[in-house]
Amino acid sequence: KWTNVTADYPALPTSNYYFSLYALSKNDIWAVGGNATSNAGSAIHWNGTTWTYYEVGQTPLYGVYFISPENGWAAGEGGYIYHFNGTSWSLHSQPTKNVIVDFSEDSEGIGWATGFDGTILKYNENFDE
């Protein structure tokens, strides 16, 4: 049975929409998307008790990936990639102008991302650091 887990949290913007979700554990879950009113990127985090809202960048986010609670990645329109350091989100880079929709990590700790128009990106440093 599916349950609407954000319905009881009026502090979350009702104009938000979400495209991707990543769960590190049952008490550490992230969802990313956008705000239909401002068009800004948005992320929400579940800590097992409540949702916390973050505005991230100026464009909607389509992909999210976390390595640990202190190392997360999100990206979306305009090719903007953001990093979460355990406290806040910041712009990491813009390696393409194409929309980025998904992230993954290989067994060597190298990050990969995919996007529109055949975009495949490789992070040439250790994704875990």
Image (cartoon, rainbow, N blue to C red):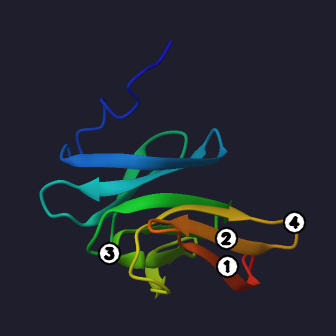
- Among the 4 quarters of the image, the one containing residue 53: bottom left
The three-letter code of the residue at mark 2 reads: Trp
Q: Is residue 43 left or right of residue 106?
A: left
N-terminal of the two: label 2 or label 1? 2
Under circle 3, the secondary element is loop
- Circle 3 packing at 10 Å, graded few (<14), some (14-19), many (20+), is many
Residue 33 lies, with reference to residue 59, above or below; the image says above
The three-letter code of the residue at mark 3 reads: Gly
CA–CA distance in space, label 4 to label 2:
11 Å
The three-letter code of the residue at mark 4 reads: Ser
Residue 3 lies, with reference to residue 21, above or below; the image says above
Q: Quadrant of the C terminus?
A: bottom right
The image position of residue 4, as x and y in percent, is: 38, 25
Under circle 1, the secondary element is strand
Q: What residue is shown with label 3?
A: 57
Camera-nearest label, 3 or 2: 2
CA–CA distance in space, label 1 to label 3:
22 Å
Q: Which residue is at 53% across, 59% downward?
A: 64
Under circle 4, the secondary element is loop
CA–CA distance in space, label 4 to label 3:
30 Å
Q: What residue is shown with label 4?
A: 107
Under circle 2, the secondary element is strand
